[in-house]
Image (spheres, helix red, strand yellow):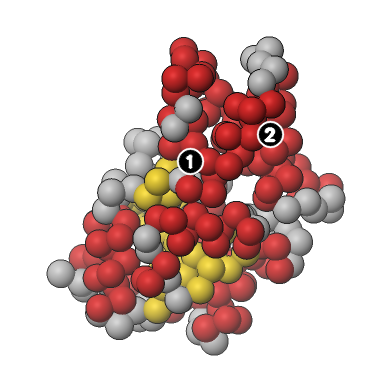
């Protein structure tokens, strides 16, 4: 499949779950959460995504900060948690999520080899900017593009148009990487060259669209782009 990436000029990455570990937010408060840590983290993420899809379908946009807060509120209520300090601490942890271990090295190699790089995220700028800075990868990212500019979440085609407009390239000149299968498929449907970063060893969603490659982490993107 490497030939499908031969014309790529821009490498675009999803943020949450792809570059940054969403479950590191709860992990930072494992002592306070105890045995609820994994359940809370998984439920929080699932509800967060569900709210983005529902708000897009309803035409009722709120930014990702609000979506994330509402999702956590739902989880606290479901799990019978009543701890405003813990709630605030979990929300603040989204601003300092940890990078996956290979991310900085991969981004640096892409920049050293002349590729343009971008984040394309549901996250609002006031959530994205702090996590990019705190993670130490800001110098390897040319631009962070947010759905906040257009008021609709992925996988709307309007979102995937943003990097094309910003960089002045065709969709086929963009390599898009996401650990979220639905996001990878949405990008492939739009026309990007897509590497699904299947970090969690999941099954491919049945949506009648094929991605160009399936990788287990971002280091496997490099040979697809001819980078050693």
| Residue 56 seen in the current view | yes
Label 1: element kind: loop
Label 2: element kind: helix
| Residue 2 seen in the current view | no
Which comes before the other along the chain, label 2 or label 1? Answer: 1
Q: Position of residue 96 (x, y in %)?
A: 48, 48
The image quarter in which residue 30 lies: top left
Q: Residue at x 31, y 76 (%)?
A: 111
Q: CA distance from mark 2 to mark 1?
A: 13 Å
How dense is the environment of label 2, judged by Cα within 10 Å: few (below 14), some, or many (20 and up)? many
How dense is the environment of label 1, judged by Cα within 10 Å: few (below 14), some, or many (20 and up)? many
Residues 75 and 162: in front is 75
Q: Is residue 107 above or below residue 166?
A: above
Q: Is residue 119 above or below residue 18?
A: below
Q: Which residue is mark 2?
A: 71
Q: Residue furthest front?
A: 85
- Relative horizontal placement of residue 40, taking residue 85 as reference (left or right): left
Q: Residue furthest left?
A: 228
Q: Position of residue 56 (x, y in %)?
A: 76, 51
Q: Residue at x 57, y 81 (%)?
A: 166
Tag 2 and tag 1, C-beta contact below 8 Å? no
The image quarter in which residue 84 lies: top right
Q: Position of residue 64 (x, y in %)?
A: 68, 50
- Relative horizontal placement of residue 38, taking residue 127 as reference (left or right): left
Q: Which residue is mark 1?
A: 22
Residues 191 and 62: in front is 62
Q: Residue at x 60, y 27 (%)?
A: 86
Residues 18 and 138: in front is 138
- Determine which of the numbered discs, if any, sits on residue 55 in the image: none
- Relative horizontal placement of residue 151, taking residue 16 as reference (left or right): right
Q: Position of residue 106 (x, y in %)?
A: 27, 63
């Amino acid at each position: 499949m490497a030939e499908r990436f031969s014309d790529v000029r821009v490498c675009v990455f999803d943020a949450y779950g792809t570059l940054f570990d969403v479950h590191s937010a709860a992990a930072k408060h494992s002592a306070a959460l105890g045995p609820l840590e994994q359940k809370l983290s998984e439920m929080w993420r699932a509800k967060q995504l569900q709210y983005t899809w529902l708000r897009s379908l309803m035409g009722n946009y709120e930014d990702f900060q609000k979506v994330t807060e509402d999702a956590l509120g739902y989880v606290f209520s479901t799990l019978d948690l009543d701890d405003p300090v813990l709630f605030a601490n979990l929300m603040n942890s989204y601003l300092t999520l940890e990078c996956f271990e290979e991310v900085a090295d991969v981004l640096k190699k892409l920049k050293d080899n002349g590729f343009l790089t971008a984040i394309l995220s549901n996250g609002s700028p006031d959530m994205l900017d702090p996590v990019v800075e705190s993670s130490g990868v800001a110098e390897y990212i040319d631009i962070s593009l947010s759905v906040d500019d257009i008021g609709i979440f992925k996988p709307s085609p309007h979102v995937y148009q943003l990097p094309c407009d910003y960089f002045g390239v065709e969709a086929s000149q963009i390599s898009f990487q996401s650990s979220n299968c639905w996001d990878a498929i949405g990008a492939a449907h739009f026309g990007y060259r897509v590497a699904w970063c299947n970090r969690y060893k999941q099954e491919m969603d049945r949506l009648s669209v094929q991605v160009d490659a399936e990788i287990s982490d971002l280091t496997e993107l490099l040979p697809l782009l001819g980078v050693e």
